[in-house]
Amino acid sequence: MYARETHSRAPSRECRISLDSLARSIAIDGPTAAGKSVVGRAIAEQLDIGFFDTGLMYRACTLAVLRNAVDPNNQEAVSTLVRSLELDMRWTNPTSPHIFLADDDVTTELRSPEIEEAVSLISRIAEVRDELVRRQRAIASREPVVMAGRDIGTRVLTDASTKIFLDASSETRARRRLGEEIDSGRDSSFESVLTATRRRDELDDSGKRALRREQAATGAIIVDTDALGVDQVVAACLEAYHDANES
Ligand code: DC
């Protein structure tokens, strides 16, 4: 289970914050490759709080499913396994937690093609989502964090005073993803990445997730990132945070 309190907290830091931790956390939602991690990490650094990309939890569960040779289409078996997992987050750096399955640091394994292929099957299972939402709320209830995903404003941090929905066209997102893939030494083409981006949107489009702006949480600010640089997006998000928390 979500164990070992001493390791699984975001790093403790002095907080001038008086409101409760869930309300002071920042929820970021949006489709794949909308820039949630880059922007979320930058906001977290500016505010000196932790960042957590919840997609990593879905990926770690997928790794466990594959390692245990559970059929990803067997929803009951997958849910039972996920509920039993010793899934742990350890923050040595506030913006890049390491993900552990029991004592095994699996962080670097979570973006493999096998996981990329299977993760949508796992993340669409309602019982898996219920379990991970519960664990994510537990993380944010200890101290404020910036949390990114697809249901953070709508389900995980419904009380957050700052909710952000990052949007971008599939072409912009594919261009960004292509840059990352080329940087990591992969031989990808724009067309193949665009097809994969659209396919991921289709596969993830279930289970009350916020993938399109009309599905964003009530009260979320919608940032269209097509024509904006990271610094501009971060500035817009920080302005929303300060507006919400300093009145
Ligand atoms: O953001 P990502 O590509 O790492 O997400 C991996 C998978 O998890 C993808 O299928 C979307 C899903 N996900 C989700 O359904 N809800 C979240 N809060 C985070 C990720």
Image (cartoon, rainbow, N blue to C red):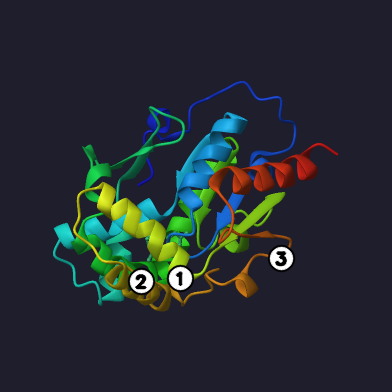
The amino acid beneath tag 3 is: Thr
Q: Nearer the viewer, residue 204 or 68?
A: 204
Q: Residue at x 49, y 59 (%)?
A: 34
Callout 1: SS: helix
The amino acid beneath tag 2 is: Leu
Badge 1: residue crowd in 10 Å (few <14, some 14–19, many ≥20): many
Callout 2: SS: helix
Q: CA distance from mark 3 to mark 2?
A: 29 Å
Name the quadrant containing residue 24.
top right
Q: According to the image, label 2 marks what residue?
A: 194
Q: According to the image, label 3 marks what residue?
A: 218
Q: CA distance from mark 2 to mark 1?
A: 7 Å
Residue 230 is situated, as x and y percent measured from the top left of the image, at 54, 46
Q: Are marks 3 and 2 in contact (CB under 8 Å)?
A: no
Q: Sequence order check: which comes first, mark 2 or mark 1?
A: 1
Residue 203 is situated, as x and y percent measured from the top left of the image, at 38, 76
Nearer the camera: disc 3 or disc 2: 2
Q: Are marks 1 and 3 in contact (CB under 8 Å)?
A: no
